Image (cartoon, rainbow, N blue to C red):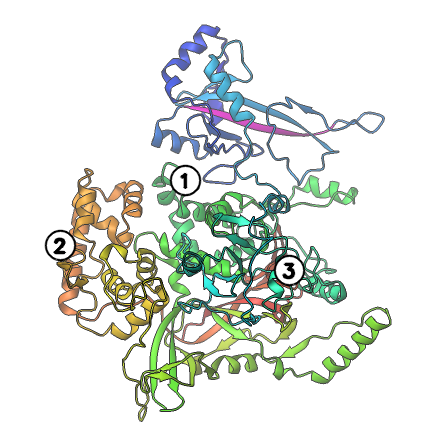
Amino acid sequence: MQRRGALFGMPGGSGNRKMAAGDIGELLVPHMPTIRVPRSGDRVYKNECAFSYDSPNSEGGLYVCMNTFLAFGREHVERHFRKTGQSVYMYLKRHVREKVRGASGGALPKRRNSKIFLDLDTDDDLNSDDYEYEDEAKLVIFPDHYEIALPNIEELPALVTIACDAVLSSKSPYRKQDPDTWENELPVSKYANNLTQLDNGVRIPPSGWKCARCDLRENLWLNLTDGSVLCGKWFFDSSGGNGHALEHYRDLGYPLAVKLGAITPDRADVYSFPEEEPVLDPHLAKHLAHFGIDMLHMHGTENGLQDNDSQPRISEWEVIQETGTKLKPMYGPGYTGLKNLGNSCYLSSVMQAIFSIPEFQRAYVGNLPRIFDYSPLDPTQDFNTQMTKLGHGLLSGQYSKPPMKSELIEQVMKEEHKPQQNGISPRMFKAFVSKSHPEFSSNRQQDAQEFFLHLVNLVERNRIGSENPSDVFRFLVEERIQCCQTRKVRYTERVDYLMQLPVAMEAATNKDELIAYELTRREAEANRRPLPELVRAKIPFSACLQAFSEPENVDDFWSSALQAKSAGVKTSRFASFPEYLVVQIKKFTFGLDWVPKKFDVSIDMPDLLDINHLRARGLQPGEEELPDISPPVVIPDSKDRLMNQLIDPSDIDESSVMQLAEMGFPLEACRKAVYFTGNMGAEVAFNWIIVHMEEPDFAEPLTMPGYGGAASAGASAGLDNQPPEETVALITSMGFHRNQALQALRATNSNLERALDWIFSHPEFEEDSDFVIEMENNANANIISEAKPEGPRVKDGSGMYELFAFISHMGTSTMSGHYVCHIKKEGRWVIYNDHKVCASERPPKDLGYMYFYRRIPS
């Protein structure tokens, strides 16, 4: 055993001294209660630091806590020791050395101590024929940094030996089965072979679906018995639906449903309600064909390329990735790549764009010391910690260093040895942000636009105090709906985070070329000749912008003037312009035969964008508003209750309440909105808020006739974001100060669980009572002087923008293919293609999928 202060750069730590076995046991006795043997459910992190991307390959090695099994780099292990008092860590270090070759050219890779890191990932950047590994493990006892070399069976207590062996042999906490293997292990539903399908004439269109009970248009499931399209359940992030698919099963007993929008030729998500799990349906193609869905003719291959379309797709891949061009690698702060974990390029592209925005850099990396110091005991499960870790990894330059001159000379001499960049692996970040999400937690390719909105939702839910960097994306959309029969109008506003532009195919400027290409392509296919060079439709951006602003028909429009269904048209305008405008080109659709299609088009996206002409104008002179009358909606459940019938206060859908509150509306107003719309979902409740937000009692607590007064007894009437008194009392009963409880609840929209986490992670507010009291007094003063409640936070300004980033997609579907990101930095475009970061020579701005614009100050 030795004591080495030099391990931490401390002077006088080079002396070694031997100790007997009894001395080692005596040294470990005070720490034995804290040393644990990992159980089957424990996650053992021995590949990556919880706060950085240090690993056993790093210069300082990695320290694994023998109690929590969290790992820390040399810069962060002292923080964990100070916070938790845990003293015993396992130090892991992999030494990489170039092989010494003999006269015969060298032996196979040599690996000493091969039983130490059985599940430690090797460095893919190194050629195993040229390098060998030597792995080192030891126990380190803090604060004196005593070291005990491993293995040491003779001297260590039996419990410590067992714990060390268990840590060293543990599997990676991220290891999952191959997705194809996982799917094959799904059970075959016992209802699939004899499934009854009603001959009711239902045919499912390839798009435009909505829930038959609540009009939601996401997370929709097709019941394979009667063809009903209904929404699924709420997910942890407030996305999903109102559970009407499950209610439909409980009412009628129809067992199987398939998720719409996720059907490919070789797979689909099928759920069995009575079996309560995802299942396989061996007859799915036949069951889908019953409703007009031709699954088997959605021809595709593993990489998402159609067999008869492979040549054009290769061209797309080459253009977007700038293949064939000698690209110069970029290194240093802001030029760090992200390694692909297997279909994780959608996440990498979005995060590169996000952390090129100063507001996100300041919110997370700028607050790194505070966020890390006050992180929870398990920082791997904290959103702000993992965002900060990722941001620092991308921006610090620590993981993007140019090769040394000697290495460059060697690479020139050895042409076969190509330069490799370090990059970072977002494995821990992806595991957390995708947790409990059925799509992002899989290894399948996903839609970058959907992940962007998912990330914004997480930022909203985990904002740091009053700071919310996602405010830069938020804007208000004014929707004008006009009854075609009476010509009366209704104006409403909703929150959005991106602008979706349709592809105006009819406005293509090269229609003659497209017709000629199509004829030549068909002739080549018929005669089995090589396909002609691809001709893309050239679409003017102005035509897409015009299509966005044109009126659209409203399905199932109910006119309050006629009190009946009528024809209606809707136009959308910007009630506010965001600081950063995200534009999505709606390239993906379904054909009439249910074959997924991607519009492979070229759009002349402008570097400078002016949308000031899309500013909303509100009610115009001469326009007459539709009466404020709600349609008589009936809930189609077993009891046939009317929507406006009173529900019990305990039955209010809190997930809908929180979703609305996170938009910036007062909590009590959100509760009333959900209550008075009969738990019909956040979208319906949002419409209620827009209609009633001008009322003087809009933000007052909900008063329910027949239930004895306010729903939140004791809450200060009218105080915007005033926490319910019973929740404050519950926290103070745990021993916390009232001021702490108020501050925590205000910062978390009165969510009890998140408020407790906030208190533990913000100890600096414990004695800052003056600040809290002043904040409370200011809030009360605002209520007296301002009766109108505060709506969603927006950063309105000019509608002039400059392009600074875009994300491109290659492939035929969002469920396959590849994403890359281009970002303009220091006056030049840079391509981020997974771990490769290079100066862009020909940025394909006309082929992008998502575009990021920043406002030009007026």
Q: Position of residue 689 (x, y in %)?
A: 28, 70
Mark 1 crowd level (few <14, some 14–19, many ≥20, 10 Å Cα) = some
The residue identified by callout 2 is 714
Cα distance in 3D space between marks 3 and 1: 45 Å
Asked if residue 75 is positioned above or below residue 31 in the image, the reply reads: below
Tell me if residue 97 is in the magenta stretch.
Answer: yes
Determine which of the numbered discs, if any, sits on residue 285 in the image.
3
Residue 665 coordinates in the image, percent (x, y)? 28, 64
Q: Is residue 405 in sight in this rendering?
A: yes
Q: Is residue 638 magenta?
A: no
Tell me the element at label 1: helix
Alpha carbon separation for disc pair 3 and 2 = 58 Å
Q: Which residues are magenta?
A: 88-99
Spot occupied by residue 438 in the image (x, y as percentages of width and height): 50, 51
Q: Residue at x 42, y 69 (%)?
A: 215
Nearest the viewer among 99 and 502 is 502
The residues bearing labels 1 and 2 have C-alpha atoms spaced at a distance of: 36 Å
Name the residue carrying label 1. 379
Is residue 768 something that shows in the picture? no
Q: Locate the C terminus by quadrant.
A: bottom left
Q: Amino acid at mark 2?
A: Gly
Q: Residues within 10 Å of mark 2 (few under 14, many from 20)?
A: few
Question: Label 1 near label 3: C-beta < 8 Å?
Answer: no
Residue 535: x %, y % from top left: 73, 75
Dominant secondary structure, magenta: strand
Quick one: 361 or 529, which is closer to the camera?
529
Sequence order check: which comes first, mark 1 or mark 2?
A: 1
At label 3, counting other C-alpha atoms closer than 10 Å, the crowd grade (few under 14, some 14-19, many 20 or more) is some
Q: Viewer-nearest of labels 3 and 1?
A: 3
SS of the residue under disc 2: loop
With 683 as the anchor, is 323 left or right in this view? Answer: right
